[in-house]
Image (cartoon, rainbow, N blue to C red):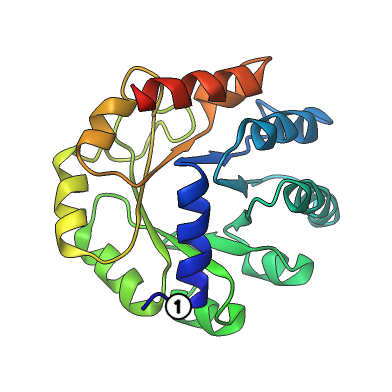
Amino acid sequence: MASPSQARFLQALKHSIIYAITDSKLMPGEQLFSKAEQALKAGIGCLQYREKTAHPADKKANAERLLQLCRQYHTPLIINDDLELALAIDADGVHLGQSDGSLAEARRQLGVGKILGATCHASLELAQQAQNAGADYLAFGRFFTSSTKPDAAPAPLALIQQAKAQLRRPIVVIGGINQSNVPQVLEQGADMIAVVDSIFRHDDTEQAISQLMTDQNQ
């Protein structure tokens, strides 16, 4: 039986396979909120707030505004790499990389109802450890050339199928995912696609997401 946090993520996945991640370069100033709302209107499954350079007070204010938007559209807000912020604003969850602290400790602090995601790069071993620590989904990548993570080591498409066979958590894929290669990752068994540039570089984010969803349903 799924835990409450796993059930919460599975519900988001049932709503949409698209996991949108913000980017301050693509979404400067008020565009963070206008483009995020377009994405929410288009029917994404999750929104992740990813911010590496903002002042902590600005970051918290931005996260609170995004949480209000996500509440309006009944969509989980996941905070990237910042457990303290996720707890402070009562976000729906947190996503942690390999250098962002203990997943087990994050699971303890989040409790049973919040979503915990983990970056696993191209490693099934790291994914197994994350699953054991209480992660609700496992993120692998990059699978294609990525403007967001240009220096990340590439992951083979076959890894997705291997992860599906060996692990018991939803598999999120990231790294250069766009309209042209969505079918490839879905054919391998990906549960959710994490996207940044392919939706938020467009002026009309809602249309970009609608096109992406149309393509993956063909």
Compared to 37, does 112 lie above or below?
A: below
- Residue at image coords 21%, 46%: 160
Compared to 115, does 142 lie above or below?
A: above
- Residue at image coords 49%, 42%: 16
Camera-side residue of 9 and 218: 218
Along the horizontal axis of the image, is 42 left or right of 60? left
Count of numbered marks: 1
- Residue at image coords 78%, 46%: 69
- Residue at image coords 27%, 34%: 185
Along the horizontal axis of the image, is 4 left or right of 126? right
Image coordinates of residue 179 in percent, x first then y, are 40, 19
Camera-side residue of 84 and 53: 84
Camera-side residue of 36 and 201: 36
What is the residue that sits farthest to the bottom in this orientation? 108
Kind of element beneath mark 1: loop
The N terminus: image quadrant: bottom left
- Look at mark 1 in the image and give the residue it sits on: 3
| Rendered image quadrant of residue 137 | bottom left
